[in-house]
Image (tube, rainbow, N blue to C red):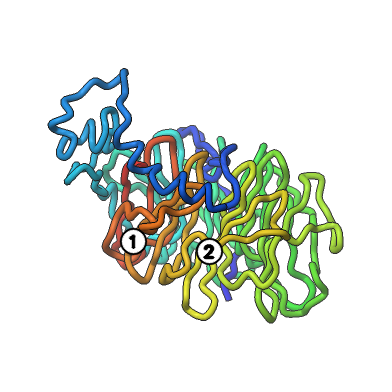
Amino acid sequence: MLGGCGLIIGIPDHELLDSDANAGDAGGDATLDAVVAVDASFDAKKDASSDASPCDAANLATDPANCGRCGHDCVGGGCVTGACQAVPLAVSAGTPVALALSGTLVFWTESAGAVQFAPKDGGNAGTLVTTTNDVDRLAVDSTYAYYSLYNQRVPFQGLDAAAGAGTLLFVQPALGLFTHNGYVYVSYSGSGNTSGLYLCTAPPNPVCNVIISALDGNAGTYFQDVKVDDAGFVFSSSPNVGGAVWSCPLAGCTGPGATQLAANAGTQLNLAITAKDVFWVDTDGGAGRMQHCTRSSCQLSITTLAPDEGVPRGIAADETNVYWTDFARGRVLACPLGGCPKAGPLVLAEGGAPLAIALDSTAVYFTNGVSGGTIVRVAKP
């Protein structure tokens, strides 16, 4: 089982943004009309023109500033047959695992025991902190980077020459980390009925209090991923059988107060949310699926966006699309929020072993999860 103690490192020289703040307002069930509508959505974008970026239509197949359509910039990648190509930004010292973004920087954790960073436009990697254990989860806000250690249950403090000592935030195995409005949300997977979701205040004197614990009274329950926006928080749990997705208001909830959005949801259960939608990956039984429902009516309708996706791992969403990585097949994919086209998900990149994924306004970032792997960027469709 994954585990770790959450640590924080101050980063006074860099302005960080919440790497998971990609919630959008668009969404809906994949009804027949919606599927028909989104089936042509990617093609429609290719046909659209941009008054702000005039271009020669004869060069749309090869122009990286106008790839596939006028104004579609490949953010440093090439343009081949009208499709933007992925470009590596930095090389990790070990296996890159988790990923987070700042205004100008990309941060990642790596299995050799470090949190590293590099410019979004590419360049040499720097090291924020080194540890004696593998570093697993990662989140950032405007001041701090928060990370957890793999299989580490004792107090631990990382050091960084520029930022000083890391502050111990939470001495328990953390499977989920997320920052929102100055708070840190930690999903904790312990033994028995001690698993829970915790809300921690920011440093320099962090205090963590349980929001919800012993969700269903099942000794095999583990809290997994957590995502938060102004409407509340959504989290996943993994009991002995199946798995579930839940929601609560920001004020918190206990036991029966949590709303179960989906039961028997599978395993892994990494999450992405928008203002209206919840997406999660399910690798139960080795047959990966991308699942979706609307936050207001999940109990009524759960949609499988993509039924055969190998081993989906990282997932993220913006106001238009949902994006995910397929670790087994080495692909980074996208579908409109309303449902995938009949031809299937759009493949944004192929090759390697993509794990984590993160978004900014123009690009998709992902880790190539092999030793000495790369941090990679590709333009949004």
Residue annotated with mark 2 = 281
Question: Which type of secondary structure does the marked residue at label 2 adopt?
Answer: strand
Residue nearer the viewer, 126 or 334: 334
Label whose residue precedes the other's in the sequence (1 or 2): 2
Q: Would residue 341 be found to the left or right of residue 67 on screen?
A: right
Q: Of the numbered discs in the image, which one, if any, rests on residue 221? A: none
Q: Is residue 349 left or right of residue 213?
A: left
Of 88 and 133, the residue lying toward us: 88
Measured as percent of width and height from the top left, residue 180 is found at 65, 41
Nearest the eye: 375 or 335: 335
**Looking at the picture, how far across and down is residue 245, in whole percent?**
68, 62
Name the residue located 23 percent from the left edge and 20 percent from the top edge: 54
Q: Residues within 10 Å of mark 1 (few under 14, many from 20)?
A: many
Q: Is residue 212 left or right of residue 352?
A: right
Drawn side of residue 24 relative to residue 241, left or right: left
Mark 2 Cα-neighbour bin, 10 Å: few <14, some 14–19, many ≥20: many
Task: State whether residue 89 is above or below residue 230.
Answer: below
Q: Position of residue 264 (x, y in %)?
A: 67, 73
Q: How many marks?
A: 2
Residue where numbered disc 1 is placed: 331
The front one of 107 and 44 is: 44
Q: Is residue 239 above or below residue 97?
A: below
Q: Position of residue 225 (x, y in %)?
A: 61, 60
Query: What residue is at 66 percent from the left and 63 percent from the top?
Result: 236
Give, as a three-letter code, the residue at label 2. Answer: Val
